Image: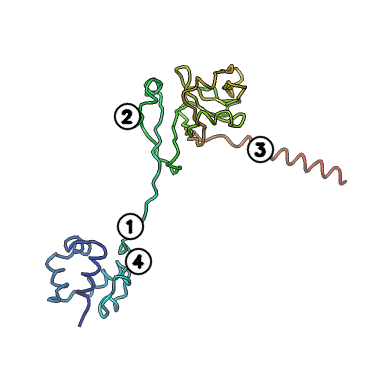
């Protein structure tokens, strides 16, 4: 007696497939599959091979043993219920400030309904923390053709007002203050925040910490172009070569 009919019915139950869905996987008619399950008809060898291969089950086991649910869950393929039971990793949705919504953001930054309407980026960051994306719009943070260019996107983690004074000198931040957003390096002097650009021709901007509406510490960067790393590497190799040369001279 073949256990084929009972086994494919059990496979359907584990997988959560209707007779129609299962039949379509193997180019069968629903009525034909029903006949197999009820033992009124025996399948062709080609059909047995297709089903066995699809679910990675030995043909002998499929035909001669009544398979248990535990056995079926050990087989490969799409047989397990892991897709339904497994916890999927949840990426955080990060609202982004762009050139198009900048003015609105300045006026409505504290309105939750507005924040929910902003375009978002999905990233594998801690969803318990608050992040914000910001599109760079100027060349203030460039120096010697390096740094941040317009259309680069920076991702910042929100800095509570009580933590601002504890940030390290030179930390990259973008700040909502005085009806604008400023992206610079942070320096703290007593009760003020000094925002300094990397571009040598841009003057510092200084604001009382109490006037800062929002501060975001830069955590991630998406460059619009591939950053130039070559010069730095070549400079370091040159320094190493010079040091080795000095060591050889001392030893000779």
Q: Residue at x 83, y 45 (%)?
A: 248
> Which corner quadrant holds the N terminus?
bottom left
Q: Is residue 250 left or right of residue 226?
A: right
Image coordinates for residue 107, horizontal then vertical, percent: 38, 20
| Label 4 vs 1, first from the N-terminus | 4
Q: In the rendered view, would you say 145 is above or below 6?
A: above
| Label 1 vs 3, first from the N-terminus | 1
Cα distance between the residues tagged 4 and 3? 50 Å
Figure quadrant of residue 26:
bottom left
Q: Which residue is mark 4?
A: 76
Figure quadrant of residue 129:
top left
Q: Residue furthest bottom?
A: 1
Cα distance between the residues tagged 1 and 3? 51 Å
Cα distance between the residues tagged 4 and 1? 16 Å
Figure quadrant of residue 53:
bottom left
Q: Which residue is mark 2?
A: 113
Image coordinates for residue 96, horizontal then vertical, percent: 40, 31
Cα distance between the residues tagged 2 and 3? 50 Å
Image coordinates for residue 61, horizontal then vertical, percent: 29, 77
Q: Which residue is mark 1?
A: 85
| Label 1 vs 2, first from the N-terminus | 1
> As rendered, which of 191 and 199 lies closer to the eye?
191
Under tag 2, what secondary structure? helix
Tag 4 near tag 3, CB within 8 Å: no
Which one is in front in this view, the residue at disc 1 or the one at disc 3? Answer: 1
């Amino acid at each position: 007696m073949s256990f084929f009919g009972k086994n494919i019915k059990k496979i359907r139950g584990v997988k959560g497939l209707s007779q129609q869905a299962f039949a379509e996987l193997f180019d069968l008619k629903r009525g034909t599959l029903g006949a197999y399950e009820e033992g009124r008809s025996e399948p062709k060898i080609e059909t047995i091979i297709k089903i066995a291969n699809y679910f990675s089950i030995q043909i002998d086991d499929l035909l001669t043993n009544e398979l248990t649910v535990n056995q079926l869950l050990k087989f490969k393929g799409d047989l397990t219920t892991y897709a339904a039971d497994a916890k999927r990793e949840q990426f955080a949705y990060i609202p982004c400030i762009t050139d198009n919504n900048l003015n609105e953001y300045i006026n409505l930054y504290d309105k939750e309904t507005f924040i929910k309407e902003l375009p978002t980026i999905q990233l594998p960051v801690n969803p318990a923390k608050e992040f914000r994306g910001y599109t760079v719009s100027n060349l203030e943070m460039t120096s010697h053709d390096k740094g941040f260019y317009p259309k680069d996107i920076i991702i910042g983690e929100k800095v509570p007002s009580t933590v601002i004074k504890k940030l390290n000198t030179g930390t990259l931040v973008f700040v909502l203050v005085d009806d604008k957003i400023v992206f610079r390096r942070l320096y703290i002097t007593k009760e003020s925040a000094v925002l300094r650009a990397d571009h040598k021709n841009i003057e510092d901007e200084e604001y009382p910490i109490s006037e800062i509406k929002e501060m975001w510490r830069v955590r991630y960067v998406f460059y619009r172009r591939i950053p130039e790393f070559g010069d730095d590497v070549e400079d370091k190799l040159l320094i190493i070569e010079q040091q080795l040369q000095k060591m050889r001279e001392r030893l000779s």
